[in-house]
Amino acid sequence: MTTPLDTPWKQILECYFPQFIAFFFPEAYSAIDWTKGFDFLDSELQQITREAETGKWIVDKLVKVYLRNGQENWLLIHIEIQNQKDSEFSERVYIYSTRLFDKFRRSVASFAVLGDTDRHWRPQSFHQSALGSQHDFSFPIVKLLDYQQTELETSNNPFAIVVQAHLAAQSTKGKASQQQRRTRKYSLTTQMYDRGWSEQEIIDLYRFIDWVLTLPPELEEAFRQDLETYERGKNMPYLSTIERMGEARGEARGEARMLIRQLNRRFGEASDRFTDRIQQLDIARLEELGEALLDFTSLADLEVWFSQY
């Protein structure tokens, strides 16, 4: 059983951006003046990525932050979360960085989180030279496979749960691993309760866990029964909220399947890139796409629709 990982990463990063930086890039966290806030510049980044024409669909975010040292009032942090090996990754980060600097004339810090399964793939620099002219570009990376289980279990940062869920999703693919996936899903969910986090934090993180650790219906039902028993013992009745989330997810999956079938009938078999992106949309966006689909004349219209999303 495979699950797209892009959307849950994007959502949890937006919910807990300071915690993301603190967990993965602590030196940068110390240098940022968090009292001045921060701003996501999604539309500006979309302009850059469309112009770059890389054809890649990954999680990337652009954030405006302020520094403590006062030497530079604000700068940009460009974050890429790459969940599969890509030979052009370093070049793409370089292209985005230079285009962002050209657009804003501000310093750009590029950070990469590598969530793939190849321990040896660690792109963190790009070099180009011609006739004595050279460009050398490097950027910090973190590799999720490097994290030790004991380290993650003792951290109180929400991204310790995120990393554990991500790694569990990778290690429990296929039908033979679904019981193990159920066990890990239950362990991670109860771990959040035991840490004394707020109801909203638990719900936000459970949304990530539930997205990446999907289960067959019979195992999902058993998981929910176990969780309900656990909640009664803890006197923390969050299950009703979790059930509503599950129902919304199921509704979205059904809507996505229907739209993909409609696209295939009208325009031929859609590429995996399109179907993956459709499956990652929430129910509101899927309804918008359903209305827009009535006016599409080709898959090129779908590409335009996504570029505006």
Image (cartoon, rainbow, N blue to C red):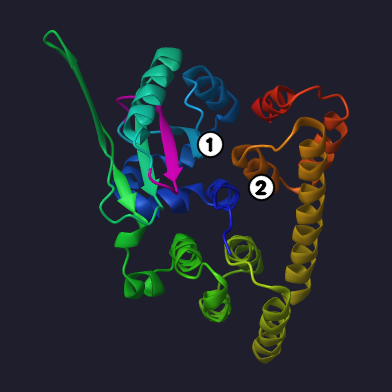
Residue type beneath disc 2: Gln
- Numbered range of the magenta stretch: 70-85
Q: Nearer the viewer, residue 12 or 118?
A: 118
Q: Is residue 235 visible?
A: no
Classify 134 as above or below 217.
Answer: above
Residue 129 point in image, percent of width and height: 18, 16
Q: Nearer the viewer, residue 289 or 174?
A: 174
Pointer 1 residue = 57
Residue 166 point in image, percent of width and height: 48, 61
Classify 153 as above or below 44.
Answer: below
Marks 1 and 2, how far apart in space? 12 Å
Answer yes or no: do the residues labelled 1 and 2 have beta carbons within 8 Å? no
Count how many numbered circles sit on residues in the image. 2
Q: Quadrant of residue 131?
A: top left
Residue 292 point in image, percent of width and height: 84, 29
Q: Secondary structure at mark 1?
A: loop
The quarter in which the C terminus is drawn is top right
Q: Is residue 194 magenta?
A: no
